[in-house]
Image (tube, rainbow, N blue to C red):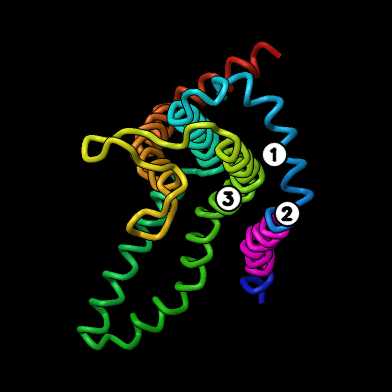
Amino acid sequence: MKVEQQQQPLAGSYFLPFLVMFLMLFIIGDVRIRAWIALSLDKLFYPLIGFGGSYPLLTLVIAGIIVVTLSSFFTNLFMDWKAMGRAQEISKHFQEELKKARKENNAAKIKKLMEMQPKILQMHTQSSSGMTKQMIFAMIFIAPIFIWLMYFLSKVPYLYFTTPWANTVSFVERSPIFITNWFLFYLIFSIVVGQVVRQCMKYLKLSGWWQNIKGVRKSAD
């Protein structure tokens, strides 16, 4: 009973990202709301990274860096990497012991391990609950940037860029995998840069640097 009561709020926290995603899809689907978001962000982003529409590829790169940095920041803010590592090690050891007990046909040990399974699952769920929170913040902050990018590209006078294999590649044409070329470029760029940024932030958090910064702030207060 106690385990079920503890799992209820966890289940609710996993439902929340889907609710936020539904709301974001509703916002993106509403033309008036989407236009308001695009025009509002255009006042901020166009003077900073719009470059008068002359360098749309550079605008995509900088926007990608902003998105990747925000996503990585929220991930490291809410994730407890040490707790997740411990949960993964315990889960791995549990599976090994359960496999060994079944191989030996040790009914008593299997029963004992199965009684422990809900607690291990709960611990694993709690350690990864930060991922749920970062998904919410990521969707809230990142989706509007994509809305602005679509608006920005709609008014760029020259929608082509050069690659080693083609002199003119259209931003808005479909790639072989059925997505626009600008979005494909963003995906490749964000995957590469995102891994670097996330690993750097993860290293800083695990190295104790972040805890030292928080300790300095507390002592200053």
> Is residue 5 rendered magenta in the image?
no
Q: Residue at x 31, y 70 (%)?
A: 95
- Provide the residue designation for mark 3: 135
> As rendered, which of 106 and 120 lies closer to the eye?
120
Q: Which residues are magenta?
A: 6-27
- Provide the residue designation for mark 1: 38
> As rendered, which of 217 and 11 lies closer to the eye?
11
Viewer-nearest of discs 1 and 3: 1
> As rendered, which of 87 and 47 lies closer to the eye?
47
Q: Residue at x 41, y 54 (%)?
A: 174
Q: Is residue 212 above or below residue 185?
A: above
> Which residue is at the far top?
220
Q: Is residue 33 above or below residue 53?
A: below
Disc on the earlier residue, 2 or 3: 2
Viewer-nearest of discs 2 and 3: 2
Graded by Cα atoms within 10 Å as few (under 14), some (14 to 19) or many (20 or more), the crowding at tag 2 reads some
- Provide the residue designation for mark 2: 27
Q: Amino acid at mark 3?
A: Met
Graded by Cα atoms within 10 Å as few (under 14), some (14 to 19) or many (20 or more), the crowding at tag 3 reads some
Q: Residue at x 45, y 73 (%)?
A: 117
